[in-house]
Image (tube, helix red, strand yellow):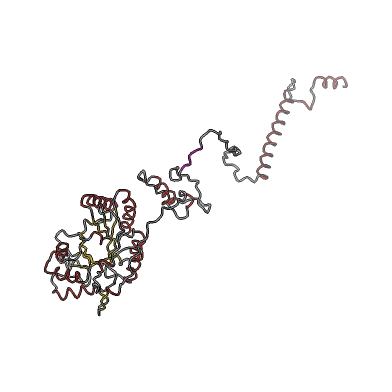
Amino acid sequence: MSDMVAKMAASGSGPDRQGEPEDGSGLRGGRVLAVAAAIVALIYGGTFAWLLLSDSRLAGEPVARLALAAPEEPSAPATPEPDAPAETAIDPLDAPADPQTTLEDGSAPTDEELALLDAARNLDLDAEQDVSGEVRITGAETLGAPETTPAPAAPVIRLAPAPDPALVEATAEGPLPRIARDGRRPSQVYARPVPPGTQAQRRIAIIVSGMGISESATAHAIETLPPEVTLSFAPYGARLQEWIDKAREAGHEVLLELPMEPFGYPQNDPGPHTLLTGGNTAENISRLEWLMSRFTGYAGVMNYQGARFTASSTALKPVLAALGARGLLYVDNGASARSLAPAMSREAGMPAVQATRIIDPVQSPEVIANALDMLQQVSAESGVAVGVASGFPVTVDALAQWATKLKDEGYVLVPATAAAE
């Protein structure tokens, strides 16, 4: 028996190894399966542990990772060579728009402010005109050009106080102008003087009408226009005497506008107390006196509309006679080619002015610019030209800018009274 057992042990057979191949491949296969099972268990166990312990909100989502380079340390500015020319400074208006530009308070400029700066850089300016100091944006002072020393202002011409008691007639309607006992006339006393030595040729007079109706427009004209510009006030405004005083204090001589009958009346109505061709002389004189009593200090009058009235010698003659007897200047606004007023005024022995053209029949910068060019041409040919404009801000601003160039172009701005014949 013992010999049999020994043989069985030696041959690898026996009850525990029944069914195994004699070459031992079964044992190796079992080991491989055990190793594989252990690997799978490790993988699943590790994954489960990672899910439990991880707190990433991007788990399961694709993630792109970027490597950011550290900012370079600013290098010290290079010291220029002794003989090297210094760099030319760049004017802020010539420099390209920089979206990183900051304002004085440290904030970034708005899109509107950047757009204004771009527009300023693209202005079509005359080569000799430097307006960089005029470009200002509220809140963006650091973007403008450096301040420059302003040119010395011209001597201020003070106008005589108004009213002059000697030139006032008290009436039930109010104060009316009159010729003083010593012969002084309102057309002279209330006129803006022309400085001695002013050139006699290439003179241009500008009259801005419609003053006193809009307070903001009136204030803008008084503050913006050169003092040589004459201001014409409508008789229907509020606080007219206050505006007259402010205008004269700023150096402007003033006129009174007289509403006169136009074609198409009454559908086209200039307002109350209009002088009418159908009215008798007494009625028109009564209306005229009401209009003249609205304020004092005016050197003359100018028609408002009135194409029909100024074409009627019968209606016009007594009105001109009354104006001449009170020492006033008559200005024809030039709107009607049929007007008899300039010729009849001269025949009556009173000073008169006839406007050359209306400057702004349309509120267009191009139309205004062309009209001003025509005035300069007429002035160069005949010695004097007179333009009449409305008090709209766009016209006032255009006139103020245009006036700054007149002297350099050989022209001189004078008040309307200086153009009287």
Work out whether 387 lies above or below 323. above
Badge count: 0
Percent from the top left, x then y, of residue 147?
Answer: 46, 51
Q: Residue at x 41, y 50 (%)?
A: 116
**Residue sticking out furthest to the right:** 2
Q: Looking at this view, is 314 or 406 the one in front?
A: 406
Work out whether 181 lies above or below 52. below
Percent from the top left, x then y, of residue 78?
Answer: 57, 36
Image quarter in which the C terminus is found: bottom left
Quadrant hosting residue 240: bottom left
Q: Looking at this view, is 201 or 362 the one in front?
A: 201
Quadrant hosting residue 172: bottom left
Percent from the top left, x then y, of residue 179?
Answer: 23, 72
Q: Looking at this view, is 175 or 104 the one in front?
A: 175
Q: Residue at x 28, y 57 (%)?
A: 414
Res 187 seen here: yes
Quadrant hosting residue 73: top right
Res 303 seen here: no
Q: Looking at this view, is 287 or 318 the one in front?
A: 318
Image quarter in which the N terminus is found: top right
| Magenta span of residues | 86-90
Work out whether 182 lies above or below 29. below
Q: Is residue 111 left or right of residue 10?
A: left
Question: Quick check: is 349 in the magenta stretch?
Answer: no
Work out whether 292 lies above or below 27. below
Report the magenta stretch's main SS: loop
Q: Is residue 38 left or right of residue 104?
A: right
**Residue sticking out furthest to the left:** 314
